[in-house]
Image (cartoon, rainbow, N blue to C red):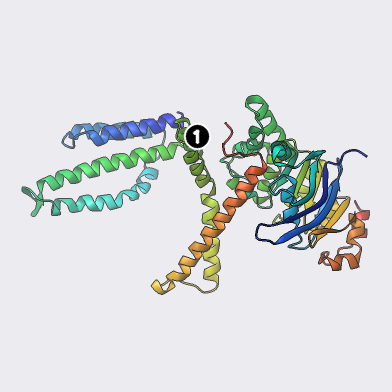
Protein backbone atom coordinates (compact mmCIF):
# COMPACT_ATOMS: atom_id res chain seq x y z
CA UNK A 1 0.00 0.00 0.00
CA UNK A 2 1.19 3.53 -0.75
CA UNK A 3 1.88 6.10 1.95
CA UNK A 4 -1.45 7.54 3.09
CA UNK A 5 -1.97 11.27 2.53
CA UNK A 6 -3.14 11.50 6.09
CA UNK A 7 -1.78 9.16 8.73
CA UNK A 8 -2.95 9.81 12.29
CA UNK A 9 -1.81 7.29 14.92
CA UNK A 10 -2.77 7.15 18.57
CA UNK A 11 -3.33 10.89 18.69
CA UNK A 12 -4.16 12.21 22.16
CA UNK A 13 -4.46 15.82 23.18
CA UNK A 14 -5.44 17.82 26.23
CA UNK A 15 -6.00 21.57 26.28
CA UNK A 16 -3.82 23.64 28.62
CA UNK A 17 -6.76 23.95 31.04
CA UNK A 18 -6.65 20.18 31.49
CA UNK A 19 -9.68 19.33 29.37
CA UNK A 20 -8.74 16.28 27.32
CA UNK A 21 -10.35 16.26 23.86
CA UNK A 22 -8.66 13.36 22.06
CA UNK A 23 -7.89 9.94 23.56
CA UNK A 24 -5.98 8.06 20.86
CA UNK A 25 -7.31 8.69 17.37
CA UNK A 26 -6.29 6.50 14.43
CA UNK A 27 -7.22 7.78 11.01
CA UNK A 28 -5.90 7.09 7.52
CA UNK A 29 -6.92 8.82 4.33
CA UNK A 30 -5.46 7.63 1.03
CA UNK A 31 -4.83 9.59 -2.14
CA UNK A 32 -7.97 10.46 -4.08
CA UNK A 33 -10.32 9.41 -1.28
CA UNK A 34 -13.12 11.57 0.02
CA UNK A 35 -13.79 10.78 3.66
CA UNK A 36 -16.50 12.19 5.93
CA UNK A 37 -15.73 12.83 9.59
CA UNK A 38 -18.98 12.52 11.53
CA UNK A 39 -19.80 12.90 15.19
CA UNK A 40 -21.88 14.82 17.69
CA UNK A 41 -20.97 18.29 18.95
CA UNK A 42 -18.06 18.16 21.35
CA UNK A 43 -16.73 14.89 19.94
CA UNK A 44 -13.33 16.47 19.23
CA UNK A 45 -13.72 16.97 15.48
CA UNK A 46 -12.43 20.53 15.43
CA UNK A 47 -9.57 19.63 17.77
CA UNK A 48 -8.59 16.83 15.42
CA UNK A 49 -8.73 19.14 12.39
CA UNK A 50 -6.43 21.65 14.10
CA UNK A 51 -3.86 18.88 14.54
CA UNK A 52 -3.75 18.18 10.83
CA UNK A 53 -1.86 21.36 10.01
CA UNK A 54 0.01 21.80 13.25
CA UNK A 55 -2.08 24.51 14.95
CA UNK A 56 -2.15 22.01 17.81
CA UNK A 57 0.77 19.62 18.18
CA UNK A 58 0.15 16.05 19.30
CA UNK A 59 0.24 15.44 23.05
CA UNK A 60 0.82 11.75 22.34
CA UNK A 61 0.82 9.77 19.11
CA UNK A 62 1.62 11.21 15.70
CA UNK A 63 0.23 12.92 12.64
CA UNK A 64 1.91 12.63 9.24
CA UNK A 65 0.94 14.11 5.90
CA UNK A 66 2.21 12.11 2.91
CA UNK A 67 4.92 10.71 5.15
CA UNK A 68 6.01 14.08 6.57
CA UNK A 69 5.46 14.24 10.33
CA UNK A 70 3.63 17.30 11.68
CA UNK A 71 6.28 18.99 13.81
CA UNK A 72 7.36 22.57 14.44
CA UNK A 73 10.24 22.20 12.00
CA UNK A 74 8.01 21.08 9.12
CA UNK A 75 5.18 23.47 9.76
CA UNK A 76 5.51 25.52 6.59
CA UNK A 77 5.39 22.53 4.24
CA UNK A 78 2.64 20.90 6.31
CA UNK A 79 0.46 23.98 5.95
CA UNK A 80 0.96 23.89 2.21
CA UNK A 81 0.00 20.23 2.06
CA UNK A 82 -3.07 20.54 4.27
CA UNK A 83 -5.64 23.10 3.16
CA UNK A 84 -8.26 23.82 5.81
CA UNK A 85 -11.48 25.58 4.83
CA UNK A 86 -13.02 26.98 7.99
CA UNK A 87 -16.71 27.11 8.65
CA UNK A 88 -17.28 30.86 8.49
CA UNK A 89 -15.99 32.33 5.23
CA UNK A 90 -15.81 35.74 6.92
CA UNK A 91 -13.03 34.33 9.08
CA UNK A 92 -11.18 33.00 6.08
CA UNK A 93 -11.56 35.93 3.71
CA UNK A 94 -9.90 38.92 5.29
CA UNK A 95 -8.27 40.82 2.42
CA UNK A 96 -9.78 43.66 0.44
CA UNK A 97 -10.47 41.74 -2.74
CA UNK A 98 -11.08 38.13 -3.72
CA UNK A 99 -7.89 38.14 -5.79
CA UNK A 100 -5.70 39.30 -2.89
CA UNK A 101 -7.31 36.75 -0.63
CA UNK A 102 -6.66 33.83 -2.95
CA UNK A 103 -3.12 35.11 -3.49
CA UNK A 104 -2.40 35.28 0.25
CA UNK A 105 -1.56 31.57 0.68
CA UNK A 106 0.65 31.07 -2.38
CA UNK A 107 2.36 34.43 -1.73
CA UNK A 108 3.25 33.19 1.75
CA UNK A 109 4.84 30.23 -0.02
CA UNK A 110 7.01 32.65 -1.99
CA UNK A 111 5.12 32.81 -5.30
CA UNK A 112 5.30 36.20 -7.05
CA UNK A 113 4.39 37.98 -10.26
CA UNK A 114 2.93 36.06 -13.18
CA UNK A 115 3.19 32.67 -11.53
CA UNK A 116 1.11 34.01 -8.65
CA UNK A 117 -1.51 35.53 -10.97
CA UNK A 118 -1.78 32.27 -12.88
CA UNK A 119 -2.25 30.33 -9.66
CA UNK A 120 -4.99 32.68 -8.48
CA UNK A 121 -6.85 32.52 -11.79
CA UNK A 122 -6.56 28.73 -11.85
CA UNK A 123 -7.89 28.35 -8.30
CA UNK A 124 -10.79 30.72 -8.91
CA UNK A 125 -11.64 28.91 -12.15
CA UNK A 126 -11.88 25.62 -10.26
CA UNK A 127 -14.70 27.05 -8.14
CA UNK A 128 -16.26 29.08 -10.94
CA UNK A 129 -15.50 32.48 -9.41
CA UNK A 130 -13.03 34.00 -11.94
CA UNK A 131 -15.24 36.96 -12.75
CA UNK A 132 -15.41 38.01 -9.12
CA UNK A 133 -11.64 38.35 -8.68
CA UNK A 134 -11.68 42.11 -8.12
CA UNK A 135 -14.73 42.28 -5.87
CA UNK A 136 -14.45 42.78 -2.11
CA UNK A 137 -15.42 39.51 -0.36
CA UNK A 138 -18.16 41.14 1.72
CA UNK A 139 -20.06 42.04 -1.44
CA UNK A 140 -20.47 38.38 -2.40
CA UNK A 141 -23.30 36.08 -1.42
CA UNK A 142 -22.65 33.56 1.33
CA UNK A 143 -22.41 30.66 -1.14
CA UNK A 144 -19.95 32.59 -3.29
CA UNK A 145 -17.84 33.42 -0.25
CA UNK A 146 -17.73 29.74 0.70
CA UNK A 147 -16.53 28.90 -2.82
CA UNK A 148 -13.84 31.61 -2.66
CA UNK A 149 -12.77 30.21 0.72
CA UNK A 150 -12.24 26.84 -0.99
CA UNK A 151 -10.23 28.58 -3.73
CA UNK A 152 -7.97 30.26 -1.16
CA UNK A 153 -6.63 26.88 -0.10
CA UNK A 154 -6.76 25.26 -3.55
CA UNK A 155 -4.31 27.96 -4.63
CA UNK A 156 -1.73 26.36 -2.33
CA UNK A 157 -1.92 23.03 -4.21
CA UNK A 158 -2.82 21.07 -1.08
CA UNK A 159 -2.53 17.31 -0.98
CA UNK A 160 -5.60 17.15 1.18
CA UNK A 161 -8.50 19.51 1.47
CA UNK A 162 -10.07 19.63 4.93
CA UNK A 163 -13.55 21.12 4.98
CA UNK A 164 -15.24 22.14 8.24
CA UNK A 165 -19.02 21.97 7.75
CA UNK A 166 -18.91 22.86 4.04
CA UNK A 167 -22.70 22.83 3.60
CA UNK A 168 -23.64 24.85 6.70
CA UNK A 169 -25.77 27.95 6.11
CA UNK A 170 -25.95 27.34 2.36
CA UNK A 171 -29.24 27.46 0.51
CA UNK A 172 -30.05 24.19 -1.32
CA UNK A 173 -28.85 25.44 -4.71
CA UNK A 174 -25.52 26.70 -3.32
CA UNK A 175 -25.16 23.46 -1.42
CA UNK A 176 -25.57 21.44 -4.63
CA UNK A 177 -23.23 23.78 -6.60
CA UNK A 178 -20.54 23.27 -3.96
CA UNK A 179 -21.05 19.50 -4.13
CA UNK A 180 -20.59 19.60 -7.94
CA UNK A 181 -17.38 21.60 -7.50
CA UNK A 182 -15.98 19.29 -4.81
CA UNK A 183 -16.77 16.20 -6.88
CA UNK A 184 -14.89 17.58 -9.88
CA UNK A 185 -11.77 18.53 -7.91
CA UNK A 186 -8.86 16.16 -8.30
CA UNK A 187 -7.90 16.29 -4.65
CA UNK A 188 -8.15 14.19 -1.50
CA UNK A 189 -10.87 15.44 0.86
CA UNK A 190 -11.62 15.10 4.56
CA UNK A 191 -15.00 16.61 5.31
CA UNK A 192 -16.28 17.37 8.82
CA UNK A 193 -20.05 17.52 8.67
CA UNK A 194 -23.40 17.08 10.38
CA UNK A 195 -25.07 16.98 6.97
CA UNK A 196 -25.35 13.21 6.55
CA UNK A 197 -26.96 13.17 3.08
CA UNK A 198 -24.10 15.41 1.95
CA UNK A 199 -21.61 12.91 3.38
CA UNK A 200 -23.35 10.09 1.54
CA UNK A 201 -23.43 12.02 -1.70
CA UNK A 202 -19.74 12.95 -1.68
CA UNK A 203 -17.84 10.49 0.47
CA UNK A 204 -17.48 6.74 0.01
CA UNK A 205 -16.11 6.29 3.49
CA UNK A 206 -17.15 7.75 6.81
CA UNK A 207 -15.47 7.91 10.20
CA UNK A 208 -17.40 8.54 13.40
CA UNK A 209 -15.49 10.43 16.06
CA UNK A 210 -17.08 10.36 19.51
CA UNK A 211 -15.66 10.93 22.97
CA UNK A 212 -12.24 11.68 21.49
CA UNK A 213 -11.76 8.35 19.71
CA UNK A 214 -12.73 6.86 16.36
CA UNK A 215 -15.87 4.99 17.35
CA UNK A 216 -16.62 3.46 13.97
CA UNK A 217 -15.70 3.64 10.33
CA UNK A 218 -16.87 2.08 7.13
CA UNK A 219 -18.64 2.71 3.85
CA UNK A 220 -20.86 5.75 4.34
CA UNK A 221 -23.98 3.90 3.27
CA UNK A 222 -23.28 1.12 5.80
CA UNK A 223 -22.60 3.56 8.62
CA UNK A 224 -25.73 5.59 7.93
CA UNK A 225 -27.99 2.56 7.66
CA UNK A 226 -26.77 1.04 10.94
CA UNK A 227 -29.52 2.38 13.22
CA UNK A 228 -27.95 1.18 16.49
CA UNK A 229 -24.58 2.71 15.68
CA UNK A 230 -26.19 5.97 14.68
CA UNK A 231 -28.23 6.21 17.85
CA UNK A 232 -25.23 5.38 20.04
CA UNK A 233 -23.40 8.43 18.68
CA UNK A 234 -26.25 10.92 18.55
CA UNK A 235 -26.39 10.89 14.77
CA UNK A 236 -29.74 11.26 13.06
CA UNK A 237 -30.83 11.19 9.48
CA UNK A 238 -33.23 13.84 8.17
CA UNK A 239 -36.88 12.83 8.32
CA UNK A 240 -37.76 10.29 5.65
CA UNK A 241 -34.19 9.89 4.36
CA UNK A 242 -33.30 6.33 3.32
CA UNK A 243 -29.52 6.03 2.84
CA UNK A 244 -29.71 2.71 0.97
CA UNK A 245 -32.23 4.01 -1.54
CA UNK A 246 -30.30 7.27 -1.89
CA UNK A 247 -27.00 5.43 -2.42
CA UNK A 248 -28.60 3.39 -5.19
CA UNK A 249 -29.24 6.59 -7.16
CA UNK A 250 -25.62 7.78 -6.94
CA UNK B 1 -3.90 58.84 -10.29
CA UNK B 2 -2.21 56.50 -7.78
CA UNK B 3 -3.62 56.76 -4.26
CA UNK B 4 -0.32 57.58 -2.58
CA UNK B 5 0.14 60.66 -4.80
CA UNK B 6 -3.38 61.78 -3.88
CA UNK B 7 -2.57 61.42 -0.18
CA UNK B 8 0.63 63.43 -0.62
CA UNK B 9 -1.25 66.10 -2.59
CA UNK B 10 -3.87 66.32 0.15
CA UNK B 11 -1.26 66.73 2.88
CA UNK B 12 0.65 69.32 0.84
CA UNK B 13 -2.51 71.25 0.06
CA UNK B 14 -3.58 71.29 3.69
CA UNK B 15 -0.17 72.50 4.89
CA UNK B 16 -0.31 75.38 2.43
CA UNK B 17 -3.87 76.27 3.44
CA UNK B 18 -3.16 76.15 7.15
CA UNK B 19 -0.03 78.31 6.91
CA UNK B 20 -1.65 80.96 4.69
CA UNK B 21 -2.37 84.10 6.79
CA UNK B 22 -6.11 84.53 7.12
CA UNK B 23 -6.02 88.12 5.82
CA UNK B 24 -5.04 86.91 2.34
CA UNK B 25 -8.61 86.57 1.17
CA UNK B 26 -7.71 86.18 -2.49
CA UNK B 27 -5.55 83.16 -1.72
CA UNK B 28 -8.56 81.36 -0.24
CA UNK B 29 -10.61 82.05 -3.32
CA UNK B 30 -7.78 80.52 -5.33
CA UNK B 31 -7.69 77.41 -3.06
CA UNK B 32 -11.43 76.94 -3.47
CA UNK B 33 -11.04 77.29 -7.24
CA UNK B 34 -8.37 74.57 -7.19
CA UNK B 35 -10.71 72.21 -5.31
CA UNK B 36 -13.64 72.97 -7.62
CA UNK B 37 -11.43 72.27 -10.63
CA UNK B 38 -10.22 68.98 -9.16
CA UNK B 39 -13.79 68.02 -8.34
CA UNK B 40 -14.96 68.85 -11.84
CA UNK B 41 -12.11 66.94 -13.51
CA UNK B 42 -12.76 63.92 -11.28
CA UNK B 43 -16.52 64.22 -12.00
CA UNK B 44 -17.48 64.30 -8.33
CA UNK B 45 -21.13 65.33 -7.91
CA UNK B 46 -21.33 68.57 -5.80
CA UNK B 47 -24.37 67.17 -3.98
CA UNK B 48 -22.35 64.18 -2.80
CA UNK B 49 -19.75 66.49 -1.24
CA UNK B 50 -22.29 68.94 0.23
CA UNK B 51 -24.25 66.20 1.96
CA UNK B 52 -21.13 64.89 3.67
CA UNK B 53 -19.97 68.32 4.74
CA UNK B 54 -22.27 68.10 7.79
CA UNK B 55 -19.29 66.62 9.67
CA UNK B 56 -18.06 70.20 9.84
CA UNK B 57 -21.09 71.39 11.83
CA UNK B 58 -19.43 71.51 15.29
CA UNK B 59 -16.69 73.73 13.87
CA UNK B 60 -19.24 76.01 12.26
CA UNK B 61 -21.03 76.42 15.59
CA UNK B 62 -17.77 77.23 17.30
CA UNK B 63 -16.83 79.70 14.55
CA UNK B 64 -20.18 81.46 14.80
CA UNK B 65 -19.77 81.85 18.58
CA UNK B 66 -16.29 83.34 18.33
CA UNK B 67 -17.20 86.92 17.30
CA UNK B 68 -19.47 87.12 20.36
CA UNK B 69 -17.07 85.83 22.97
CA UNK B 70 -13.68 87.14 21.76
CA UNK B 71 -12.10 90.25 23.29
CA UNK B 72 -10.60 93.32 21.60
CA UNK B 73 -12.00 96.22 19.57
CA UNK B 74 -15.61 95.70 18.51
CA UNK B 75 -17.51 96.57 15.34
CA UNK B 76 -21.23 97.03 14.74
CA UNK B 77 -22.76 94.53 12.32
CA UNK B 78 -26.56 94.57 11.87
CA UNK B 79 -26.93 96.15 15.28
CA UNK B 80 -24.80 93.50 16.99
CA UNK B 81 -21.57 94.38 18.70
CA UNK B 82 -18.98 91.87 17.50
CA UNK B 83 -15.32 91.41 18.27
CA UNK B 84 -13.11 92.29 15.32
CA UNK B 85 -10.44 89.71 16.07
CA UNK B 86 -13.20 87.18 16.79
CA UNK B 87 -14.68 87.77 13.35
CA UNK B 88 -11.32 87.29 11.75
CA UNK B 89 -10.61 84.08 13.70
CA UNK B 90 -14.05 82.77 12.81
CA UNK B 91 -13.41 83.44 9.16
CA UNK B 92 -10.00 81.73 9.36
CA UNK B 93 -11.41 78.67 11.12
CA UNK B 94 -14.34 78.40 8.77
CA UNK B 95 -12.31 78.88 5.59
CA UNK B 96 -9.50 76.52 6.54
CA UNK B 97 -11.90 73.93 7.94
CA UNK B 98 -14.17 73.98 4.92
CA UNK B 99 -11.28 73.70 2.47
CA UNK B 100 -9.89 70.77 4.49
CA UNK B 101 -13.21 68.97 4.58
CA UNK B 102 -13.78 69.44 0.85
CA UNK B 103 -10.27 68.27 0.02
CA UNK B 104 -10.67 65.21 2.25
CA UNK B 105 -14.02 64.40 0.72
CA UNK B 106 -12.59 64.69 -2.79
CA UNK B 107 -9.98 62.11 -1.83
CA UNK B 108 -12.67 59.86 -0.38
CA UNK B 109 -14.85 60.26 -3.46
CA UNK B 110 -12.13 59.29 -5.90
CA UNK B 111 -10.37 56.56 -3.93
CA UNK B 112 -11.70 53.24 -2.65
CA UNK B 113 -10.69 52.26 0.90
CA UNK B 114 -8.61 49.48 -0.67
CA UNK B 115 -6.63 51.90 -2.84
CA UNK B 116 -6.12 54.17 0.13
CA UNK B 117 -4.68 51.35 2.23
CA UNK B 118 -2.35 50.34 -0.61
CA UNK B 119 -1.39 54.00 -1.10
CA UNK B 120 -0.43 54.35 2.55
CA UNK B 121 1.57 51.16 2.26
CA UNK B 122 3.51 52.64 -0.64
CA UNK B 123 4.15 55.72 1.49
CA UNK B 124 6.05 53.38 3.83
CA UNK B 125 3.58 53.63 6.67
CA UNK B 126 4.58 50.91 9.19
CA UNK B 127 3.28 47.47 8.16
CA UNK B 128 1.38 46.96 11.40
CA UNK B 129 -0.59 50.19 10.99
CA UNK B 130 -1.44 49.38 7.38
CA UNK B 131 -2.55 45.88 8.34
CA UNK B 132 -4.75 47.19 11.15
CA UNK B 133 -6.38 49.65 8.76
CA UNK B 134 -6.91 46.99 6.12
CA UNK B 135 -8.62 44.72 8.65
CA UNK B 136 -10.76 47.60 9.86
CA UNK B 137 -11.92 48.28 6.30
CA UNK B 138 -12.65 44.61 5.73
CA UNK B 139 -14.49 43.87 8.97
CA UNK B 140 -16.33 47.16 9.55
CA UNK B 141 -19.34 45.83 7.67
CA UNK B 142 -19.22 42.41 9.32
CA UNK B 143 -19.19 43.96 12.79
CA UNK B 144 -21.86 46.58 12.07
CA UNK B 145 -23.98 43.79 10.64
CA UNK B 146 -23.53 41.82 13.83
CA UNK B 147 -24.43 44.92 15.82
CA UNK B 148 -27.59 45.39 13.75
CA UNK B 149 -28.60 41.76 14.29
CA UNK B 150 -28.10 42.13 18.04
CA UNK B 151 -30.23 45.30 18.02
CA UNK B 152 -32.97 43.51 16.10
CA UNK B 153 -32.84 40.60 18.55
CA UNK B 154 -33.08 43.02 21.49
CA UNK B 155 -35.95 44.92 19.92
CA UNK B 156 -37.74 41.65 19.12
CA UNK B 157 -37.88 40.94 22.82
CA UNK B 158 -39.45 44.30 23.49
CA UNK B 159 -36.39 46.32 24.42
CA UNK B 160 -36.43 50.05 23.76
CA UNK B 161 -33.60 52.24 25.05
CA UNK B 162 -35.62 55.13 26.44
CA UNK B 163 -33.75 56.38 29.49
CA UNK B 164 -30.42 55.91 31.31
CA UNK B 165 -31.89 52.95 33.21
CA UNK B 166 -31.56 51.00 29.97
CA UNK B 167 -27.91 51.82 29.49
CA UNK B 168 -26.60 48.75 31.33
CA UNK B 169 -28.29 46.61 28.67
CA UNK B 170 -26.60 48.57 25.93
CA UNK B 171 -23.28 48.35 27.74
CA UNK B 172 -23.61 44.59 27.96
CA UNK B 173 -24.41 44.43 24.24
CA UNK B 174 -21.28 46.40 23.48
CA UNK B 175 -19.33 44.02 25.72
CA UNK B 176 -20.77 41.01 23.92
CA UNK B 177 -19.92 42.58 20.58
CA UNK B 178 -16.37 43.20 21.73
CA UNK B 179 -15.95 39.59 22.82
CA UNK B 180 -17.43 38.30 19.58
CA UNK B 181 -15.11 40.50 17.57
CA UNK B 182 -12.18 39.41 19.67
CA UNK B 183 -13.02 35.75 19.07
CA UNK B 184 -13.47 36.43 15.38
CA UNK B 185 -10.02 37.98 15.41
CA UNK B 186 -8.64 34.76 16.82
CA UNK B 187 -10.42 32.67 14.19
CA UNK B 188 -9.16 34.94 11.41
CA UNK B 189 -5.65 34.60 12.76
CA UNK B 190 -6.05 30.82 12.80
CA UNK B 191 -7.18 30.87 9.17
CA UNK B 192 -4.21 33.07 8.26
CA UNK B 193 -1.71 30.87 10.06
CA UNK B 194 -3.21 27.86 8.27
CA UNK B 195 -2.26 29.48 4.99
CA UNK B 196 1.33 30.04 6.01
CA UNK B 197 1.15 33.50 7.64
CA UNK B 198 4.19 34.20 9.78
CA UNK B 199 3.58 37.78 10.88
CA UNK B 200 4.35 39.67 7.67
CA UNK B 201 2.05 40.28 4.76
CA UNK B 202 3.55 38.83 1.58
CA UNK B 203 4.42 41.55 -0.95
Residue at horizontal 81%, vertical 67%?
A234
Residue B190 makes an appearance in the image: yes
- Counting every numbered tag in the picture gives 1
Tell me residue A18's x, y (percent).
68, 61
Tell me residue B111's x, y (percent).
46, 37
Q: Which residue is mark 1?
A: B118
Q: Compared with residue A141, is residue B200 higher up or lower down, i.e. above or below?
A: above
Closer-to-camera residue (A26/A82): A26
| Quadrant of residue A188 within the rendered picture | top right
Closer-to-camera residue (A43/A15): A15
Residue at horizontal 60%, vertical 47%?
B189
Q: Compared with residue A14, is residue A136 higher up or lower down, i.e. above or below?
A: above
Tell me residue A72's x, y (percent).
69, 41
In the rendered image, the quadrant that contains the N terminus of chain A is top right
Closer-to-camera residue (B183/B160): B183
Tell me residue A195's x, y (percent).
78, 58
Bin the neighbour count of mark 1 within 10 Å (Cα to Cα): few under 14, some 14-19, many 20 and up. some
Specify the farthest residue to the top.
A114
The answer to whether B109 appears left or right of B13 in the picture is: right
Residue at horizontal 80%, vertical 60%?
A39
Residue A180 makes an appearance in the image: no
The answer to whether A185 appears left or right of B59 in the picture is: right
The answer to whether A91 appears left or right of B79 in the picture is: right
Look at the numbered disc 1 and give the secondary structure of its residue. Answer: helix
Residue at horizontal 88%, vertical 60%?
A224
Q: Which chain does the residue under circle 1 lie in?
A: B
Amino acid sequence: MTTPVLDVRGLAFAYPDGHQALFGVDLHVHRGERVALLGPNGAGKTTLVLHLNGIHLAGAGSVAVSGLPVTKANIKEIRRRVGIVFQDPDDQLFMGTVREDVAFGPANLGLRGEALDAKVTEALAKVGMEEYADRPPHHLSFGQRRRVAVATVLAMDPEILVLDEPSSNLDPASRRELADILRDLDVTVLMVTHDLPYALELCDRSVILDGGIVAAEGRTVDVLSNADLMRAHRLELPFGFDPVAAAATL
Amino acid sequence: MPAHLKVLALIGFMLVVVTTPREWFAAYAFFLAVLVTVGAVARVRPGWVLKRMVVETPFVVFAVLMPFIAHGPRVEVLGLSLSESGLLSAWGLLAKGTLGVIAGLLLAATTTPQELVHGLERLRLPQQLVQIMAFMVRYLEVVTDEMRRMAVARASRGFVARNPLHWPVLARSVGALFIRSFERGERVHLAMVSRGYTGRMPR
